[in-house]
Image (cartoon, helix red, strand yellow):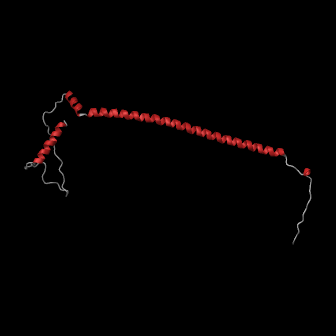
Amino acid sequence: MVVAQGKLEWQQPLDELPRPKKQAISRKSKPSHWKSVLVLGLTVSVAAALAVETINLTVVKGAQIRVVEKEITSLKSNNDLLQVKVDKLRSVNRIESEALAMGMEKPAGTVYMAGTLPVAKSQTGTVPTQTASQPVTEQPSVLKQISQKFTSFFASTQR
């Protein structure tokens, strides 16, 4: 079925057309304007409060770091002084003077300590056949005699 369109043309005077109320439109736009200003103000206030708190925390932590660094340098200097005292107390001259003050006597000449040296194992893991109880019959070489005198000299200077 085919229907033709019809045109209706009529005119009404503009005075008779209904107009929207201006008061209703203006009332709706003002609250939304104030709401956006209020939301913007709250957002700026919260951001400013966070910024102030962050700056405050940074300054406080920086001051705490400086205090701790000063304490570290103070403790390092005290540690150095204590290390100097320890070195003085460990010195051979002080120990010798304290021993003499307690009534000990300084040994005369070279002092040899009796003891046994550990026996070294050979590469195959067997112990050498010569033991410490068997006497050594051969004479030490000249090089060995010189090294013994050299070590005894330095051992005597350490006492």
Residue 56: x percent and y percent?
A: 55, 36
Residue 142 shows in this picture: yes
Quarter-wise, where is residue 109 in the image? top left
Residue 156: x percent and y percent?
A: 16, 37
Residue 113 shows in this picture: no
**Relative to 75, 32 lies left or right:** right
Residue 61: x percent and y percent?
A: 50, 37
Quarter-wise, where is residue 3 in the image? bottom right
Q: Measuring 59% from the left and 37% from the top, which residue is drawn there?
A: 52
Relative to 110, does residue 13 appear above or below in the rendering?
below
Q: Measuring 77% from the left and 45% from the top, which residue is drawn there?
A: 29
Q: Measuring 23% from the left and 34% from the top, which residue is drawn there?
A: 92
Q: How many marks?
A: 0
Residue 2: x percent and y percent?
A: 87, 71
Outermost residue to the bottom? 1
Q: Measuring 71% from the left and 42% from the top, which residue is drawn there?
A: 37
**Relative to 28, 124 lies left or right:** left
Q: Nearer the viewer, residue 69 or 97?
A: 69
**Relative to 60, 127 lies left or right:** left
The quarter in which the N terminus is drawn is bottom right
Relative to 157, does residue 139 appear above or below in the rendering?
below
Q: Nearer the viewer, residue 34 or 113?
A: 34
The quarter in which the C terminus is drawn is top left
